[in-house]
Amino acid sequence: MARSDRYINMKNAGSVILLNRLILPQSKQIDQTWAEITMSTDNNGLNQSTTAKEQMKENNDILFSGISILSYNLYLRPFPPFFNGQRLRSHLIPYHTKDYDIVVFQEVFDKHSRSQLQLKLHEYGFLFMSQTVGYGGLFKVNGGIFIASKFPIEQQQYRAFRDACSGFDCFADKSILYTKIQFNQTFFVHIFGTHLQAKLGRQKTRIRTRQIDIIKQFIDTLNISSNEPVIIAGDFNIDRFLQPDEYLNMLSVLNIKIPPYIGEYSFTFDSRTNDLIGIRHSDHKQECIDYVFYSKMHLQPKLSYQRILQPKTFQAWKEFNFEQDYYDLSDHYPVLSYYEF
């Protein structure tokens, strides 16, 4: 889905007009958003492309309009022992992320699938990739989180949750990932990605509370300027409908806010509409557990909204001939968030 250029360089002009057009797929309520602003020109990781960085440093007159951020849990578990079409899906997923500026991925555990995914993302303009958090081992996989960006990643680091885990989650090195991304000569956005403890129950809630405290401490140690935006995205495994107290506590501890929702979908994990999980959850399980928040302690957006997408493949896929046809790309639906600062 095409999107017009959002940056217009007008050297030696008295004013700069910023045109922004974001087309949201599958939208019935809002198909596109236009923003036109006139300003005075006087107001002023890893695998990075040197050419792109040099060009950005030369474009001192480019002004920043808006940013689209996608959070996507990909369900790319290690192959083997799991057979969920990981290596087929890793080829198909990037096409459905190509229109956005930054993608925060979770559950990218399978090494081969991750390599294929990142090669395809690069073809669609994601020239900058963060590290994938954590370390694998004989009985443990990495943290499964990495960030892909169309703009330079200037800094990155992460903090692992270590022993703040329970059950099968302890076989993954779950963490909080931080990246500082440069959009033009003077504008930076700080993006965090995470994946919290899964499942319900008092013990799981206590673990998530510990993980949220670790995230809070990690953000505080970075001393990020209050004049720059901070975004926290990922799979939080806290359902805002089913677990309202835990959800509100998370918002309070992290001092974060969620943009208004647009669109018709309310769930990021939905066995009624997702064929990858329908076979596992005949009880019609529905949850909203994936989010893109922004910090209330840092630069506030002038405009923001969030939308749950339901990408489907154009043609059915299957890993084995005896399987049913699949059209979904993951067991989670991605969340698209748009911000203007």
Image (spheres, helix red, strand yellow):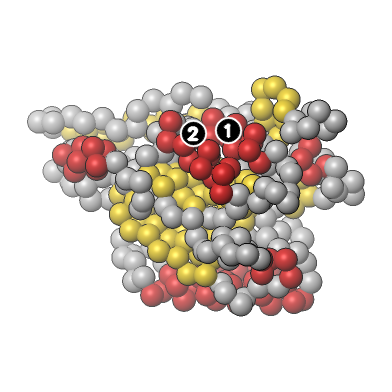
Residue 24 lies, in percent from the top left, at 54, 32
**Res 8 visible:** yes
Tag count: 2
In the picture of the structure, the residue carrying the numbered disc 1 is 91
In the picture, the disc for residue 120 is 2
Q: Nearer the viewer, residue 308 or 84?
A: 84
Residue drawn at point x = 57 percent, y = 55 percent: 144
Tag 1 and tag 2, C-beta contact below 8 Å: yes
Residue 46 placed where, x, y %?
Answer: 36, 51
In the image, what residue type sits under mark 2? Lys
Neighbourhood count class around disc 1 (C-alpha, 10 Å): few under 14, some 14–19, many 20 upward: some
**Residue visible at 51% across and 49% down in the picture:** 104
Disc on the earlier residue, 1 or 2: 1
> Where is 59 relative to 281, above or below?
above
Decide if residue 289 is on the left or right side of residue 64: right
- Considering only vertical position in the picture, is 262 above or below 181? above
The picture quadrant where one finds residue 52 is: top left
Compare residues 289 and 314 and report the one nearer the observer. Answer: 314
**Considering the numbered disc 1 on the image, is that residue within a helix, a strand or a loop?**
helix
Q: Which residue is at the far left?
A: 12
x 26%, y 30%: residue? 8
**Marks 1/2: CA distance?**
7 Å
Disc 1 residue type?
Answer: His
Q: Position of residue 316 (x, y in %)?
A: 73, 25
